[in-house]
Amino acid sequence: MNFKFKDKKIIPKVALIGRPNVGKSTLLNRLTRTRDALVDSTPGLTRDLRYAEIKWDNLTMQLIDTGGMGRSPDMDSISRIVHEQSLRAVEESDMLLIILDVKEGLTPADREIVDLLRPYKKPYLIIINKVDNPSRELDLGEFYELGVNEVIPVSAEHGKGINALMTRVVDVLKHMHRPVKDIPEDLEGLTQESKNKPIRVALIGRPNTGKSSLLNMLVGEPRMIVTDVPGTTRDAIDTLLQRPGRKDILFTDTAGIRRKTSVSDKIEKFGIIKAINVIKACDIVLIVMDISEGITDQDKRLIGYTERYGRACITLFNKRDLIQQDQSLVKLRSGELERAKRFISYSPHLNISALTGKCVNRILPLIDDVYVDFNALINTGSVNSVLQKALAKRTPPISKGHHLKIYYTTQVATKPPKFLFFANYPDFIPSQYKRFLANQFREQLGLKQTPIRILFRKRERRP
């Protein structure tokens, strides 16, 4: 039988919660078998939320690695925002893994965290980390003072107790399932509701690429501090552009996102966290780059953030006036951009000058066009017609000895459009065939300026 979570999430989310330096990122690395999460002995190193998808015992889940929780009167602004981010992870998750440190014992901060989380009524497990040898198990008794019937000892660093932990996680998650019925219940209602909200547009880019100058040009009056000093904009600032007869646009100008290794002060670090949160919350990202400097590694990272979080995107080469006569350089930059955008080839591009206004008047109409694709709702008959054409054009391959069949599909979300395919062996669909289907749907449905997401699920057998 197929299952769906009560909050309509397709993949369950499991948040790793605890004080700083109890081993949350180490546990994430152990579970993902990678070193993708940043791990260090410095308390509070993980600042923003980190997501990783894993499959355990045939159950796919998404892990959320959070920064350290904890409240105290002397918390600085960064610690406060990290704490708030952790609470947001709690809200969006289906299950919590509360991680404690056996070497430090049960601390008042641990008790406070558990008390803080109980009102959320999320299922949770108490994980005691750093139990590196049998003698440490003698120290587990005090953790039962939290009022739980079970604590799970592990050593994330050495891999001890991981199988027992994940067996319990899978068991809890499977008991949260219920049969899939109608998907979705009110997608049209959600789309109708979005008609009353402004289009959320984030301006992101490296420092001093001209984001604030561009915003001033778009809204028709100076609202941002514009200087030649990189990093003038420290906060994410909202500006509402009201347009009678058309959807309003809520612009958010962010601090310039630098490489993390180059960020030296806490205010800049706070700005990075805010900027990434703005990307997650917006509809469309305007990535502003300096055409005179070309595509940098950091520009590529910003493109990666946009693709990772499924946002629509418009790339802008600003300061076109600086290389007005150098057509060879313009051609070179176009080639660089083409290579950098290979994963977001759907995103349109403009060469502009926020200083002179060249081509800036094309941005607002382009935002409107992109938003139509990003918020598109396609009827089930149309999407299945496209599916049948795609299957006729290229049949699913044989994978690992299985003859793959895709039966039907339905749209389950907008912003971006998301389609759920029902198949006989969904876990064996090759990635290249998934890309083929995504490209066919984008082309045949006219969704050429938006990311789309495709998911696969095993078709429920009829009795």
Image (cartoon, rainbow, N blue to C red):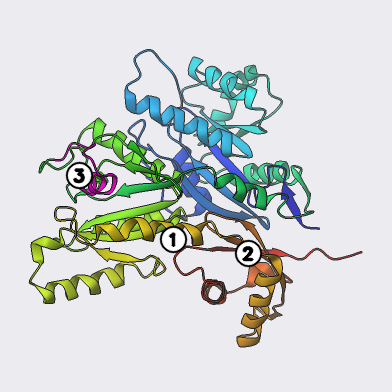
> Which numbered dot is residue 91?
none
The residue at the point 38 percent across, 65 percent down is 347
Question: Which residue in the rendered view is the most extreme toward the right?
Answer: 463
Task: Judge the density around disc 3: few (<14), some (14-19), many (≥20) Cα neighbours within 10 Å.
Answer: few
Quadrant into which the C terminus falls: bottom right
The residue at the point 10 percent across, 43 percent down is 228
In contact (CB < 8 Å): disc 2 and disc 1:
no
> Which numbered dot is residue 262?
3
Which residue matches tag 2?
378
The residue at the point 35 percent across, 43 percent down is 251
Q: CA distance from mark 2 to mark 1?
A: 16 Å
Q: Nearer the viewer, residue 422 or 56?
A: 422
Task: Judge the density around disc 1: few (<14), some (14-19), many (≥20) Cα neighbours within 10 Å.
Answer: many
Question: Which residue in the rendered view is the most extreme toward the top?
Answer: 73
Q: CA distance from mark 3 to mark 2?
A: 45 Å
- Residues shaded magenta: 211-226
In contact (CB < 8 Å): disc 3 and disc 2:
no
Secondary structure of the residue carrying numbered label 2: loop
**Residue 227 relative to residue 202: left or right:** left
Task: Judge the density around disc 2: few (<14), some (14-19), many (≥20) Cα neighbours within 10 Å.
Answer: some
Question: Is label 3 or label 2 in front?
Answer: 2
Secondary structure of the residue carrying numbered label 3: helix
Secondary structure of the residue carrying numbered label 1: helix
The residue at the point 72 percent across, 55 percent down is 183
**Residue 245 visible, this angle:** yes
> Which numbered dot is residue 370?
1
**Residue 396 visible, this angle:** no
Would you say residue 347 sits in the magenta stretch?
Answer: no
Q: Nearer the viewer, residue 282 or 459?
A: 282
Q: Earlier in the sequence, mark 2 or mark 1?
A: 1
